[in-house]
Image (cartoon, grey):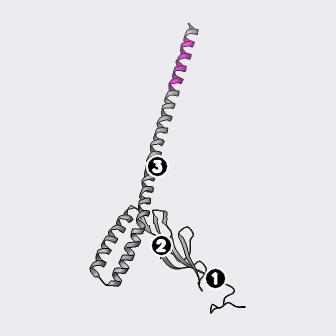
Amino acid sequence: MAGEEAKEEKEAKAEEQKGEDYKERMLRLAAEFDNYKKRVKNEVENAKGMGKAEMTRKLLPVLDEFELALMSANENGDKALVKGIEMVYSNLLDALKREGLKEMKVNGVFDPYKHEIIIAKEDKKKPGTILEVVKKGYMFNEMVLRPASVIISKEKSEGESESGIEGK
């Protein structure tokens, strides 16, 4: 009988171990599923953000055209037209800003990640200094949507004098 009790005790411990194994597997699967749900949620949010960024990128030429229309209307002196264009432009810009659009700040020094050089002019300023912004740059949250198009300074060529006449 002692042998049977030992055998039953051994079987009970094996069953208990099996139950523990099942419990551990279930907990592991629950954790994996929870991680999967979080990952999918992040991927969906990223996809939404990328969709918003792409739509915003497509609307940037419209903002540029509104700015040109405002300048033209101001030159013509039609105050009613200027007011109307300003209102539409302002509403569009506000809606895009609420979604994450930010106008890029140009701090005076060329940054290849944020600026695109259109022209490099000889100037007395330190080379790489931004002289003029030709087209505004925009960010969407922390992503560059469009780099700012800029004119920067460069050093005078060695063969040129102050008057711009080449030396011999």
Rounded to the nearest whole Å, what is the CA distance between mark 2 and mark 3? Answer: 30 Å
Is 7 situated left or right of 141 in this image?
A: right
Could you tell me how far apart the alpha carbons at marks 1 and 2 are, in whole angstroms?
25 Å
The numbered mark, 2 or 3, whose residue comes first in the sequence reads 3
**SS for callout 2:** loop
Q: Amino acid at mark 3?
A: Glu
Q: Residue at x 53, y 13 (%)?
A: 8
Q: Which residue is mark 3?
A: 43
> For the residue carrying disc 1, how many other residues have a C-alpha within 10 Å: few (<14), some (14-19), or many (20+)?
some
Q: Are marks 1 and 3 in contact (CB under 8 Å)?
A: no
Rendering coords of residue 142 (x, y %): 48, 62
* Mark 2 neighbour density, 10 Å: few (under 14) some (14–19) many (20 or more): few
* 86 with respect to 52 (left or right): left
Image vertical order of residue 29 relative to residue 51, above or below: above
Farthest residue to the top: give it: 1
Residue 3 against residue 124 in the figure, above or below: above
Q: Which residue is mark 2?
A: 105
Residue 61, horizontal then vertical, whole percent: 42, 68
Please report whichever mark, 1 or 3, sits nearer to the chain's N-terminal start. 3
The main secondary structure of the magenta stretch is helix
In the depicted view, which residue is nearer to us: 81 or 123? 81
Callout 1 amino acid: Glu
Locate the N terminus by quadrant: top right
Q: Which mark is residue 155?
A: 1
